[in-house]
Amino acid sequence: MRLLVNGKAHELEAAPDELLLWVLRDKIGLTGTKFGCGEGECGACTVLVNGRPVRSCQVPAAAAAGKPITTIEGLERNGRLHPVQAAFLRHEAFQCAYCASGMIMSAAGLLARNPKPSERQIRAAMNGNLCRCGTYSRILKAVRAAALASRKRA
Ligand code: FES
Ligand code: FES
């Protein structure tokens, strides 16, 4: 199959039911996408497919073939962090950071389709991402800050 990941094409072999998460991590070497629950419940494995956040532990890689896939490694541009990444750093929106990649991808997906999200929309978009360390208030602060930054740019 041919996977388009972070703007680069990868030709690879994978079983029809092989999950996108493992293909990204084990076959392409992009280990920024994390395995958490493996059941679609925690959001640690979130990537963007066609600009939409998906749980890569639930999606066969074959289903994403030919579609643009973005992982945490593909967010920065020309050495500049994505505004959501920058806001997470600025607001220290993590402790162990295991959830951070999925959190950032969910937030980036939200801002890509809605640069001016309301508080309710932010909370709804981030609702499926879990943080075992409980840094939710800082995570929300970072997403609000990134939204504000993208609003100023819009
Ligand atoms: S590892 Fe995919 S949702 Fe938890
Ligand atoms: S910072 Fe540890 S799980 Fe979120």
Image (spheres, grey):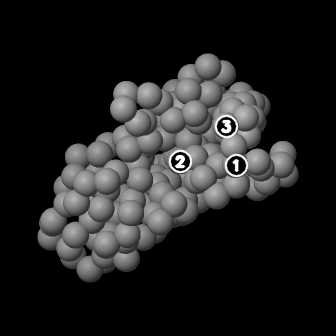
Q: Which residue is mark 2?
A: 105
Q: Position of residue 63 (x, y in %)?
A: 37, 76
Instruction: Say if residue 117 shows up in the picture.
Output: yes
Q: Tag 3: Cα neighbours inside 10 Å, few (<14), some, or many (≥20)?
A: few
Q: Are marks 3 and 1 in contact (CB under 8 Å)?
A: yes
Of the 4 image quadrants, the one containing the N terminus is bottom left
Checking the image for residue 153, the label placed there is: 3
Of the 4 image quadrants, the one containing the C terminus is top right
Q: Tag 1: Cα neighbours inside 10 Å, few (<14), some, or many (≥20)?
A: some
Q: Which residue is mark 1?
A: 115
Frontmost of labels 1 and 2 is 1
- Is residue 21 shown above or below 126? below
Which amino acid type is marked by label 3?
Answer: Arg
Which amino acid type is marked by label 2?
Answer: Met
Which amino acid type is marked by label 1?
Answer: Pro
Q: Position of residue 82 (x, y in %)?
A: 51, 35
Q: CA distance from mark 1 to mark 2?
A: 14 Å
Instruction: Say if residue 99 shows up in the picture.
Output: no
Frontmost of labels 3 and 1 is 3
Residue toward you, 52 or 7: 7
Q: Is residue 59 left or right of residue 120?
A: left
Q: Tag 2: Cα neighbours inside 10 Å, few (<14), some, or many (≥20)?
A: many
Q: Position of residue 35 (x, y in %)?
A: 42, 50
Q: Identify the secondary structure beneath mark 2.
A: helix
